[in-house]
Amino acid sequence: MPALAPGERELRVLHVSDLHLIPSQRRKIEWVRSLAALEPDLVIDTGDNLAGHDALDPLLHALEPLLEFPGAFVLGSNDYYSPTFKNPARYLLPDARGPVRSTPDLPWEPMVAAMRDAGWADLTNRRDAVVVRGRRIDLAGVDDPHLDRDEFPAPSAPSPGEDTAALRLGVTHAPYTRVLDRMHADGADAIIAGHTHGGQLCLPGYGALVTNCDIDRRRAKGLHGWPGARPDAPGGEDSTWLHVSAGAGTSPYAPVRFACRPEATLVTFTARGRI
């Protein structure tokens, strides 16, 4: 992704999303731990980590090697609320949101505390910055738009003598267009999101059937530009790079993917003008 200023050296960002972890998923836990071998410069977690009340300890075990790297995170609905059985036909609705429960029932607070204690930046409707190999990365994130919890953080005034950031990242769980538009207008060099599961059920030659939000299905996963009529034409002054992860899990009540493999993504940022 050529989003860095000209002359900047490469920056490798590991994007992990939508683990929807339950304790019995031992292979997934070991796979997540193995991602540390990629030695990223930065880890971004775009939420929906949990899928059960007893998943916190297995999740922290899975993330333990990744927490050794600089990182940042936002939360998704399945960090707050446990999954419930739904009519499978609802999946085919464009934005299949049910009634929002009033009280979170998953252990999101100790999860957030563990990530913060490891040094990861909490981007829940917040801005922050991390320094990676001597370069500052400015981050702006929102709480889950799928739950209408997003409140875009106000710009922060630069400190006198502050160096220009090498990269400005927008981070959100669900890529709703209102959030992407705000991040684009805010001057983000790139936006990172999850939530869609890449469509989860896809048709070969056609792609995702739905995205479970209001983004178009052609942008259900992968690297695109935002905004613009052509999702495969990023770059330029009027477009922001957008990466949407297909995620690594599913709801335990719908544990099926078709033509859409689970994933984590290693994004290599390069200087603009290079691909």
Image (cartoon, rainbow, N blue to C red):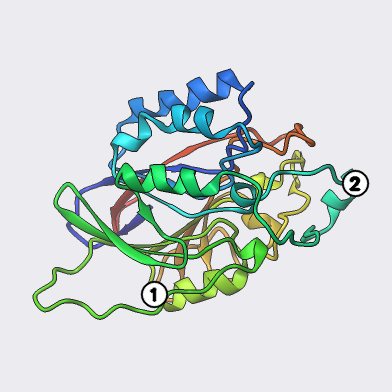
SS at circle 1: loop
| Residue 205 seen anywhere in this rendered image of the structure | yes
Q: Is residue 70 left or right of residue 19?
A: left
Image height of 178 relative to 275, above or below: below
Give the residue number, with chain letter if any, for mark 1. Answer: 237
Front one among 173 and 204? 173
Q: CA distance from mark 1 to mark 2?
A: 44 Å
Q: Where 21 falls versus 26 (above or below)?
A: below
| Residue assigned mark 2 | 87
Residue positioned 69% across, 44% down in the render:
82
Q: Image quarter for residue 24?
A: top right
Tell me the kind of residue under disc 2.
Asn
Instruction: Please give the name of the residue rendered at 60% of the width and 33% of the height, measured from the top-left corner.
Output: 21
Q: Residues within 10 Å of mark 1 (few under 14, many from 20)?
A: few
- Compared with 96, 105 (above or below) is above
Amino acid on which the number 1 mark rests in the picture: Glu
Residue at x 66%, y 63% (from the top left corner): 147
Task: Give the total of numbered labels.
Answer: 2
In this rendering, the label closer to the viewer, 1 or 2: 2
Identify the mark nearer the N-term, 1 or 2.
2
- Please state the horizontal and vertical placement of residue 234, each as a whole percent of the image: 47, 63
Side of 30 where 271 appears, left or right: left
Near-viewer residue (136 or 121): 121
